Image: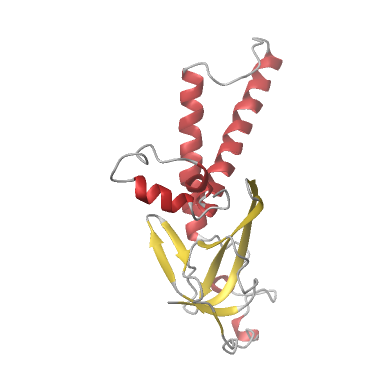
Amino acid sequence: MIQGYVKKVNTKDGKGKRGPWTLYSCIIEQDDGTESGWISCGFDKPPFAEGSYISLETSKDGNYTNLVPGSVKQLDPPKRAPAPTAQGMATGGSPAPAERKDTYVNTQDSIVYQSSRKDALALVALLLENDALPMSASAAKAGIAKRFEEITAFVDKLTVQYVRDVQTGRVLQSVVDAGAESPATAGRAASAEGSTPDND
């Protein structure tokens, strides 16, 4: 069971055979201050919003964490700790370094970003090696600068794509497993397809 404040709610919109759909996911800031990482909430709007104090149950599906339907409970939030006094302030009236949160970076988000960045760089290198990345061909200085912009923009775009893939699990919804038609996996593939909005 996970209990805490809903820190983030993310949505991913798309359109399938049955019309438009929205996939929801969230992050819970738990009572001990740690974060849950992204929890997939499925295609039904969850019964909470950012800032809600709740408890819920989750299940694991490979590297993905899913909300157990019907497990969400709205709770009375605990009392917040009092604001820092003058003794807890650094020189100049700003919060002491241990209490500052303006430079805080979510650990799991940082790991996902770094991994996505490396994967994006690896794919761009492979595309360049095989002359499969459309770019400006001019050998002049202007062409070199243009290619630099094109390559870095492509890396950035792929990085964001891979981060969103992890957050929403959308690749699992849209790409068929290479072994899905084998006797060992056909049943699982059919079950997975039946849970998406594109199911007939």
Nearest to the observer: residue 127 or residue 74: 74
Residue at horizontal 48%, vertical 58%? 108
| Residue 107: x %, y % from top left | 48, 59
Residue at horizontal 65%, vertical 72%? 49
- Please state if 45 lies on the left or on the right of 189 as rendered: right
| Residue 137: x %, y % from top left | 64, 12
Task: Count numbered badges in the picture.
Answer: 0
| Residue that extends furthest to the left in the rendered view of this protein | 184
Residue at horizontal 53%, vertical 19%? 132
Nearest to the observer: residue 194 or residue 97: 194
Residue at horizontal 60%, vertical 27%? 151
Does the image show residue 119?
Answer: yes
Residue 12 against residue 25 in the figure, above or below: above
| Residue 16: x %, y % from top left | 62, 46
> Image quadrant of residue 94?
bottom right
Q: How is the image coloured?
A: secondary structure
Residue 94 against residue 167 in the figure, above or below: below
| Residue that extends furthest to the front in the rendered view of this protein | 200
| Residue 124: x %, y % from top left | 51, 28
Residue 185 against residue 105 in the figure, above or below: above
> Image quadrant of residue 145?
top right
Does the image show residue 100?
Answer: no
Quadrant location, the N terminus:
bottom left
- Please state if 171 lies on the left or on the right of 149 as rendered: left
